[in-house]
Amino acid sequence: MQNSLSRQILLSVLGVAMLILALVGVSYAVFIQPSTEFDVVTSHSGDVVLLSNHSTLDINLANLSIMNDYYGKVLSDDDVVIDFDVLTYLPAYSSVSYELVIFPEQVSVSDFSINVRFYLEKRLGEEYRAVPNTSYPISFVANGKNSTLGSPSSSMTLFSSTFSNDSDVTKEYVDHFRLRTWLDEHTDLINSSFDGVYKIQLYSKIW
């Protein structure tokens, strides 16, 4: 009786250990050397990761320059142009939805919502093209409610999409993005003060 009980306990412990190893293996899969030039994981949500060459994807307001949208859309300064990738390894016959959001953190700005401009592009082939949410430069407007993927009401959605794997093997999926940020040409620096950062965050859910 005692031996039988001990055997059941041992089998249960081994079963839990194997399950943990399996889960860790799935989560770790996203860190396999990917087909991306970036190597710094700045944000992750489940098995979807956001990669860049920056230690953080923070937009420091003190680094932004005043300009009109025409010039803002072609900015090339590394301090205000951020390239990043969204990467995942999807198991067979599964899908994952993700969204990129931005939100102010420790921001102390007079009328900041109408002054900071955002312009997100996604790489299609060899070119970067504006995504639907920022087909033209936009100012920050909070979503006002939490999303089904987990982003807070205080954030603004820049882009959302879904990766779907209809094959019978695990496959890699990656989207490439470029974000430009500047201050609107009508910004009054004399009567306004800018401090703090905007943060880019990733949220996702596997189906």
Image: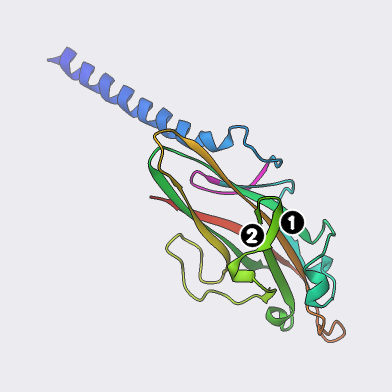
Q: Confirm whether residue 108 shows in the render.
A: no
Drawn side of residue 62 relative to residue 150, left or right: right
Residue at position x 70%, y 42% in the image: 38
Give the colour scheme of this rendering. Answer: rainbow
Q: Residues within 10 Å of mark 2 (few under 14, many from 20)?
A: many
Q: Is residue 102 above or below residue 124?
A: below
Q: Is residue 112 above or below residue 162?
A: below
Q: Quadrant of residue 202?
A: bottom right
Q: Quadrant of residue 117?
A: bottom right
Q: Which residue is mark 2?
A: 200
Residue 109 seen in render: yes
Asked if residue 193 lies in the magenta stretch, the reply is no
Cβ atoms under marks 2 and 1 closer than 8 Å: yes
Instruction: Nearest to the eye among marks 2 and 1: give it.
Output: 1
Q: Decide: few, some or many residues near mark 1? Use Cα within 10 Å; few <14, some 14-19, many ≥20.
A: many
Q: Main secondary structure of the magenta part?
A: strand
Q: Is residue 161 left or right of residue 117?
A: left
Q: Secondary structure at mark 1?
A: strand
Q: Can you tell which quarter of the image residue 111 is in?
A: bottom right
The residue that label 1 is drawn on is 82
Q: Secondary structure at mark 2?
A: strand
Q: Which residues are magenta?
A: 40-48
Point out the residue furthest to the left here. 1
Q: Residue 177, how many percent across, how many down?
A: 66, 55
Percent position of residue 150, x then y: 46, 60
**Identity, as a three-letter code, of the amino acid under mark 1:** Ile
Please report the residue visible at 57 percent of the width from the left and 75 percent of the height from the top. 142
In the rendered structure, which disc, 2 or 1, sits on the residue that comes first in sequence? Answer: 1
Front position in the image: 146 or 119: 119
Picture residue at 45% right of the left edge, 59% below the top: 149
Q: Could you tell me residue 152's position as x and y percent? A: 51, 66
The answer to whether 96 appears left or right of 131 in the picture is left
